[in-house]
């Protein structure tokens, strides 16, 4: 990292451009900046090590920090790993990166897209090499430290040491070292995001109230053994990142029924239960006609990523974004920041829309295993879904509609919009039980449909959960793409630099 006394001059390949000299800052400016850093509540200013390691800027920085985030997801436990919380964290980090990158482009390039929350002035106090890397890296680090530092996730380990290590691996210096960009760019962006998400409802710890009627969700056993374990009963009321509200695209309840008694009396409900019972049971095998095939089992496990130690559904889709960006040659820092932000905003709002339907409608539908066991069809039936100890389980929240399906469609619609169409790509899984570790698809819709269907094969969702989730996820993503980070018409004659 360039220090305040770096005597070198800008060269033709510096971000500052040929012919520009790096800013000279008097000692009183350094003191004033340090005071501003302290007042802004940023990282502590400490002296740099005498001999810092060389930076290692291999690969795109936004991809690097999303990989860091995905590794944190693997360490989270219990309520800390709820899908909505993970999606919220991704949206906060990536949108902050994008706004910081927008400020960088305003100063050294050309702004091509509207910022998420806003940009701001970028004073050229210190112009040094790798300034764009520092803008992105220090922004990502500060947001993640906010989200996963000391006393932020009571069920999971403090991630500060890991974040520090990732910063050192990238920059060869300590994250607590002085950098004037903390004052000029990073802290304004981070503070703006912090204020925007303060009191957004994400810390609501309300406990779910059970409805003791057939059809209503209830704990399914194992780790999900009481109403207090229900995940995110108020997440549908969290302030969205882009859409108007969690219920903006809420579909009618299954079969448009307003009571459980009416719903359970329909033939379609009985057909739905029969389908999951046949395709999603732990004992369902390809050896029995009309039951789950070996391919469907592989599909179920490829997309699962529900257990501790995996990167969870949100992490899988972020990783797929990274893989596809690499396969398609998305190399510009500005473009990578925009892609990951659009994906993350869509996933965050998809989680809110899905949880709105799960808990804030007249039907909090019970899981298929409750329908089959408690409904008197088969007291021994268990879903294929299982933890690392082989204990079969259903996620601890209502079935309708599927979060996986909503995420999948939101991701697919965002990717299709960003890239302008479909193409063939290969992606992977982090679920340790998956017999197939990578899969190739010819379109984003194909991948999303398989993701949604996988929940039926896993035995934790009904087919209509997948259908309704996909419909809402697509609408959420279309809304995000239409209104956030939109293109700005090019200024005639303006040069563009990434």
Image (spheres, rainbow, N blue to C red):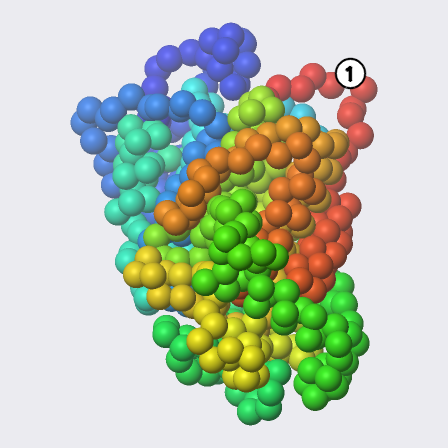
- Decide if residue 309 is on the left or right side of residue 447: left
The image shows residue 482 at horizontal and vertical percentages of 77, 46
Q: At 59% across and 49% down in the image, what residue appears?
A: 451
* Residue found at the far bottom of this picture: 212
Q: Is residue 233 visible?
A: no
The image shows residue 438 at horizontal and vertical percentages of 48, 35
Task: Name the foreground residue: 258 vs 31.
Answer: 258
Q: Which residue is mark 1?
A: 493
Identify the secondary structure beneath mark 1: loop
User: Considering only vertical position in the picture, is 372 above or below 153?
Assistant: below
Task: Name the foreground residue: 29 vs 205.
Answer: 205
Q: At 75% across and 76% down in the image, what residue appears?
A: 267
User: Considering only vertical position in the picture, is 191 above or below 391?
Assistant: above
- Decide if residue 487 is on the left or right side of residue 189: right
The image shows residue 388 at horizontal and vertical percentages of 33, 57
Task: Name the foreground residue: 68 vs 258.
Answer: 258
**Quarter of the rendering occupied by the N terminus:** top left
The image shows residue 31 at horizontal and vertical percentages of 34, 39
Q: At 47% across and 72% down in the image, what residue appears?
A: 381
- Decide if residue 129 is on the left or right side of residue 95: left
């Amino acid at each position: 990292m360039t220090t305040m006394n770096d005597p070198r001059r800008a060269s033709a390949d510096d971000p500052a451009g040929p012919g520009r000299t790096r800013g000279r800052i008097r000692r009183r400016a350094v003191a004033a900046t340090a005071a501003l850093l302290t007042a802004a509540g940023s990282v502590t200013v400490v002296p740099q090590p005498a001999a810092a390691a060389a930076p290692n800027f291999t690969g795109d920085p936004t991809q690097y920090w999303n990989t860091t985030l995905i590794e944190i997801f693997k360490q989270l436990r219990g309520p800390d790993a709820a899908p909505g919380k993970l999606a919220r964290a991704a949206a906060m980090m990536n949108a902050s990166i994008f706004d910081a990158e927008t400020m960088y482009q305003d100063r050294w390039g050309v702004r091509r897209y509207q910022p998420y929350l806003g940009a701001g002035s970028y004073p050229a106090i210190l112009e040094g090499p790798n300034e764009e890397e520092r803008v992105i890296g220090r922004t990502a680090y500060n947001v993640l430290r906010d989200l996963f530092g000391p006393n932020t996730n009571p069920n999971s380990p403090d991630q500060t040491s890991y974040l520090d290590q990732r910063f050192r691996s990238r920059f060869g210096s300590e994250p607590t070292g002085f950098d004037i960009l903390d004052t000029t760019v990073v802290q304004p962006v981070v503070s703006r995001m912090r204020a925007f998400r303060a009191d957004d409802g994400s810390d609501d710890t309300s406990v779910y109230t059970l409805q003791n009627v057939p059809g209503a969700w209830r704990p399914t056993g194992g780790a999900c053994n009481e109403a207090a374990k229900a995940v995110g009963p108020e997440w549908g009321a969290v302030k969205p990142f882009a859409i108007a509200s969690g219920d903006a695209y809420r579909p009618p309840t299954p079969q448009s029924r307003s009571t459980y008694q009416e719903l359970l009396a329909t033939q379609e409900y009985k057909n739905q239960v029969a389908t999951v019972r046949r395709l999603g049971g732990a004992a369902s095998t390809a050896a029995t006609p009309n039951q789950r095939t070996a391919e469907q089992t592989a599909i179920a496990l490829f997309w699962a990523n529900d257990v501790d130690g995996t990167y969870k559904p949100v992490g899988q889709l972020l990783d797929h974004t990274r893989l596809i960006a690499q396969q398609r040659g998305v190399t510009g820092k500005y473009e990578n920041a925009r892609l990951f932000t659009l994906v993350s905003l869509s996933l965050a709002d998809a989680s809110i829309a899905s949880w709105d339907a799960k808990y804030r409608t007249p039907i909090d539908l019970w899981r298929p295993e409750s329908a089959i066991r408690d409904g008197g069809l088969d007291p021994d039936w268990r879903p294929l879904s299982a933890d690392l100890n082989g204990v079969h389980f259903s996620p601890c929240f209502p079935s309708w509609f599927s979060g996986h399906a909503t995420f999948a469609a939101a991701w697919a619609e965002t990717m299709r919009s960003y890239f302008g169409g479909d193409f063939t790509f290969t992606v992977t899984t982090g679920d340790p039980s998956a017999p197939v570790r990578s899969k190739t698809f010819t379109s984003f819709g194909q991948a999303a449909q398989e993701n949604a269907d996988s929940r039926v094969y896993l035995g934790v969702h009904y087919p209509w959960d997948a259908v309704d989730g996909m419909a809402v996820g697509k609408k959420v993503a279309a809304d995000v793409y239409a209104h956030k980070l939109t293109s700005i018409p090019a200024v005639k004659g303006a040069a563009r630099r990434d």
